[in-house]
Image (spheres, grey):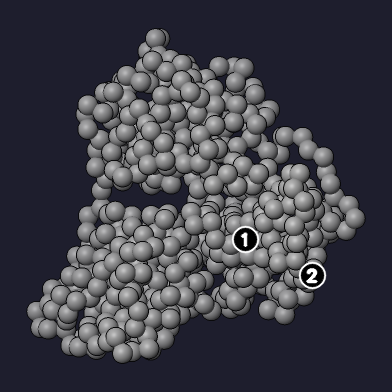
């Protein structure tokens, strides 16, 4: 067996079931070996799209996904997606061929580049160590939830595997428990709190974490909120105020900013989630629970940091507090009274917040559009959102069934990832209707993967919020009392996105008013042989509410 064959077989033995990439000469053989072992390989049209698909798949499946790349240019083409995954601590294993000879036109410092974007750099060092090297890289992905770039020198992969080289072993994965003294200090803060709020982030998406947090919240009277990336985690709870941060409803912002104890569960408590700190009152105690020691206190000082797994920390704290709120008459009720319950029921959704419908003149208000889409679409959906001025509308007006129904690749805040994100999410959850929400700029950036959607036969709905400009820049630089600058670099003639979509083999609609969505009903109820692309000509007369805050960086 050659090293390249051993790489593919070892990855499958370790548990890899899905790989994405663009195949070139350098990664041809180990990609085929992985597929022959039983994994599914999805061929993208661009390495950047493949990276984002693999990232989204890993997020939605809780599996280590593989990204397979050619050396040099194939690797660099994927870097934006790899950076997004690294910043999001996605368990993504990038297996890339490497030209180690400096005279090669494919030679670049692949290790240095990986470390520069925040990934872990590794390598297959020799035929003798190949299986161990692959196993170790997989283990870092699975156990530490890190993005790892495994460089495979093209000369090494063609060597025979030495006789007796051992098979890879699937590593055990588990989270550390917090220190007992820290749990005691946390329990004391909870006992004293009168208005606690729990904010769950990416680290709370792990198995059992949401349930453990909710049980502790029930015991202590805490309200439940999430960062954008964990949206849907507490769906169904009458004490959930949905998302904290720029997407927070007026009620959620009011209640969170009134808390006397805020607990971040696997949540960075950064400027996005805490509105540049404005959602944390001056007298509030702040607690942060995280698996990564360096993440605790990174964005703001905390009164207590607990290093450990989210579920483990919540369970240990609940055990220390003992019993349930009903069994302890002295237990705090926190925010959980009838008045707050009634307000959450009446004001807890953006669809319950009044607005002036600006539809008219051949353009549809994006809020009106998204609310109507929410009404038409089946509940079992998986929503993926690109970056841009529009992104708050699908993020807040489209309901999702749970946290596995929302894929938010925004850690690097790159425009153009939305369509590829939706492909990876759809392949991870084929039981749900995939919805890709993009701006016109991001859609056109990532349009090469529209062919991938058609080729794979994914019954996807792609909603393009088309305002014929890079709206974030237009509204940011033309706002206020400043003299209006030249915006020709960020405004464009109206593109007929529906016609482009039909040329790719999709069904398509141009929407300027709610009635134009009538054909969408037929597509939803039909067999969905082809994807549907909606060219929504939206109003965009001002920057969206979340964006006006976001440009504080």
| Residue 483 percent across, percent down from the top left | 77, 51
Q: In this view, does 184 lie to the left or right of 382?
A: left
Q: Mark 2 — residue?
A: 493
| Residue 166 percent across, percent down from the top left | 13, 73
Label 2 vs label 1: CA separation? Answer: 23 Å
Q: Quadrant of residue 444?
A: bottom right
In depth, the one of 140 and 107 nearer the eye is: 107
Count of marks, rendered view: 2
| Residue 340 percent across, percent down from the top left | 60, 20
Q: Quadrant of residue 450?
A: bottom right
* Label 1, residues with CA under 10 Å away: few <14, some 14-19, many ≥20: many
Q: In this view, does 517 lie to the left or right of 552?
A: right
Q: Residue at x 35, y 44 (%)?
A: 295
Tell me if label 2 and label 1 are in contact, CB under 8 Å: no
Q: Nearer the viewer, mark 2 or mark 1?
A: 2
Q: Mark 1 — residue?
A: 436
Q: Residue at x 30, y 71 (%)?
A: 111
Q: Which residue is drawn at 68% across and 79% down?
A: 504
- As displayed, is residue 16 above or below residue 90? below
Q: Residue at x 52, y 77 (%)?
A: 46
Mark 1 lies on a secondary structure that is strand
| Residue 495 percent across, percent down from the top left | 77, 71
Q: Which of marks 2 and 1 is nearer the N terminus?
A: 1
In depth, the one of 225 and 411 nearer the eye is: 411
Q: Quadrant of residue 91?
A: bottom left
Q: Is residue 368 visible?
A: yes
- As displayed, is residue 459 above or below residue 320? below
Mark 2 lies on a secondary structure that is loop
């Amino acid at each position: 067996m050659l090293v390249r064959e051993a790489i593919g077989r070892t990855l499958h033995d370790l548990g890899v079931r899905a790989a994405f990439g663009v195949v070139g000469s350098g990664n041809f053989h180990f990609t085929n070996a992985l597929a022959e072992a039983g994994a599914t390989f999805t061929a993208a049209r661009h390495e950047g799209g493949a990276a984002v698909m693999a990232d989204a798949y890993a997020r939605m499946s809780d599996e280590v996904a593989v990204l397979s790349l050619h050396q040099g240019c194939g690797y660099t083409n994927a870097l934006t997606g790899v950076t997004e995954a690294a910043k999001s601590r996605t368990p993504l294993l990038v297996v890339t061929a490497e030209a180690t000879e400096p005279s090669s036109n494919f030679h670049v410092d692949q290790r240095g580049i990986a470390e520069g974007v925040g990934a872990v750099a590794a390598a297959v060092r020799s035929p003798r160590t190949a299986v161990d090297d692959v196993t170790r890289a997989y283990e870092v992905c699975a156990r530490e939830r890190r993005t790892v770039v495994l460089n495979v020198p093209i000369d090494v992969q063609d060597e025979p595997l030495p006789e007796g080289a051992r098979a890879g072993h699937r590593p055990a994965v588990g989270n550390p428990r917090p220190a007992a003294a820290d749990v005691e200090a946390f329990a004391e803060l909870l006992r004293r709190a009168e208005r606690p709020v729990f904010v769950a982030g990416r680290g709370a998406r792990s198995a059992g974490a949401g349930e453990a947090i909710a049980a502790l919240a029930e015991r202590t009277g805490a309200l439940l909120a999430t960062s954008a990336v964990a949206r849907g985690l507490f769906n169904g709870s009458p004490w959930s105020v949905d998302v904290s941060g720029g997407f927070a409803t007026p009620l959620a912002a009011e209640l969170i900013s009134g808390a006397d104890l805020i607990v971040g569960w696997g949540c960075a408590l950064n400027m996005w989630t805490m509105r540049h700190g404005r959602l944390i009152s001056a007298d509030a105690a702040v607690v942060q629970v995280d698996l990564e020691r360096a993440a605790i206190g990174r964005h703001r000082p905390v009164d207590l940091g607990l290093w450990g797994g989210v579920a483990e920390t919540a369970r240990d704290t609940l055990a220390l507090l003992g019993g349930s709120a009903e069994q302890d008459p002295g237990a705090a009720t926190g925010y959980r009274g009838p008045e707050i319950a009634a307000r959450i029921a009446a004001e807890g959704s953006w669809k319950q917040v009044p607005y002036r419908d600006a539809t008219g003149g051949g353009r549809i208000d994006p809020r009106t559009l998204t609310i109507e889409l929410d009404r038409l679409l089946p509940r079992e959906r998986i929503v993926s959102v690109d970056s841009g001025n529009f992104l708050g509308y699908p993020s807040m007006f489209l309901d999702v069934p749970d946290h596995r129904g929302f894929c938010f690749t925004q850690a690097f805040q790159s425009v153009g990832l939305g369509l590829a994100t939706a492909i990876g999410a759809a392949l991870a959850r084929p039981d749900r209707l995939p919805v890709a929400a993009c701006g016109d700029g991001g859609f056109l950036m990532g349009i090469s993967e529209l062919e991938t959607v058609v080729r794979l036969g994914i019954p996807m709905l792609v909603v393009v919020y088309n305002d014929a400009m890079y709206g974030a820049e237009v509204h940011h630089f033309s706002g206020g009392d400043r003299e209006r600058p030249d915006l020709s670099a960020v405004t464009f003639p109206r593109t007929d996105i529906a016609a482009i979509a039909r040329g790719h083999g999709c069904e398509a609609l141009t929407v300027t008013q709610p009635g134009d969505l009538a054909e969408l009903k037929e597509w939803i109820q039909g067999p969905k042989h082809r994807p549907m692309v909606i060219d929504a000509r939206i109003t965009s007369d001002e920057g969206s509410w979340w964006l006006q805050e976001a440009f504080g960086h």
